[in-house]
Image: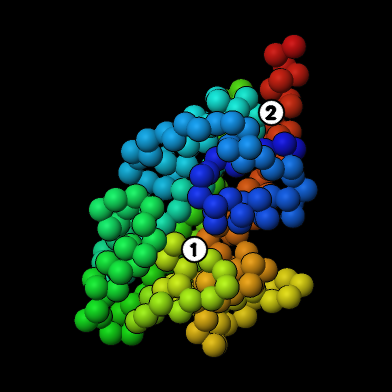
């Protein structure tokens, strides 16, 4: 199926493209389709924002569209930054400033209280207005300093997942304490919040499309 990936974030696009293509879909970014609109994500939940984004870009593209809204929820901060993850520092899209603020907020928080989870809502919107939203999350903790690697973006250098993926499938405990940005794409996709949401989408997609086909037949 041809799917538009509704994001202008290069790191997120790379993940969505990698995961969707591995599932057998053809992916076009909104930029490749000449879509420049940026819908206002004013929802109060990840699912609401994913739907807002998917709906707007689907209308503009005319093809099936996948949008993701995701963020970091830190236990010691009452779940913040949450849906405001991309603009935690006060403005949108400054990864370094967001990471700096998070480190300051957690400066006096001990290791045992630095638990966190990444959450992702992935919404597939069809041109007929029907949509499917799937959730995924990854548990972990926040490091005391950036743990940069060759991969990742956003809060990835600070987030240490509890698990990491194995070559050929499966997962294991992240005994080395590597950050998201230090995991290879395969290691991350197997356990990441976005990877898990996309797994749920893949499992539910056949019945969703079959239901759409039946409804379309009834309308003929």
Q: From this view, report whether residue 190 is shown above or below residue 121.
A: below
Which residue is denoted by mark 2 in the rendering? Answer: 212
Q: From this view, report whether residue 141 is shown above or below residue 177.
A: above
Identified at 55% across, 52% down, the residue is 10
Residue 130 visible (yes or no): no
Residue 21 position, x and y percent, is: 73, 50
Q: CA distance from mark 2 to mark 1?
A: 36 Å
Identified at 38% across, 39% down, the residue is 41
Residue 192 visible (yes or no): yes
Q: Nearer the viewer, mark 2 or mark 1?
A: 1
Which residue is denoted by mark 1 in the rendering? Answer: 153
Question: Disc 2 on helix, strand or loop?
Answer: helix
Taking depth in this image into account, of 133 and 186 the one nearest to the observer is 186
Indicate which disc, 2 or 1, sits on the residue closer to the N terminus. Answer: 1
143 left or right, relative to 179: left
Identified at 33% across, 77% down, the residue is 114
Q: Quadrant of the C terminus?
A: top right
89 left or right, relative to 7: left
């Amino acid at each position: 199926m041809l799917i538009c990936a509704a994001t202008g974030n290069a790191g997120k696009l790379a993940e969505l493209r990698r995961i969707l293509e591995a599932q057998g879909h053809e992916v076009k970014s909104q930029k490749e389709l000449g879509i420049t609109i940026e819908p206002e994500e004013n929802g109060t939940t990840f699912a609401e924002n994913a739907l807002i984004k998917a709906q707007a870009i689907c209308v503009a593209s005319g093809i099936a569209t996948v949008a993701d809204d995701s963020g970091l929820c830190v236990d010691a901060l009452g779940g913040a930054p949450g849906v405001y993850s991309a603009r935690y520092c006060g403005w949108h899209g400054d990864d370094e400033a967001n990471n700096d603020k998070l480190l300051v907020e957690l400066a006096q928080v001990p290791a045992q209280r630095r638990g966190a989870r990444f959450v992702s809502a992935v919404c597939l919107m069809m041109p007929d207005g029907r949509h499917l939203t799937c959730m995924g999350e990854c548990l972990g903790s926040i490091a005391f300093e950036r743990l940069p690697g060759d991969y990742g973006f956003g809060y990835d250098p600070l987030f240490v997942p509890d698990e990491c993926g194995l070559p050929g499938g499966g997962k294991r405990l992240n005994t080395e304490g590597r950050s998201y940005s230090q995991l290879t794409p395969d290691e991350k996709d197997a356990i990441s919040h976005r990877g898990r949401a996309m797994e749920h989408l893949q499992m539910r997609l056949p019945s969703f499309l079959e239901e759409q086909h039946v409804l379309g037949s009834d309308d003929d």
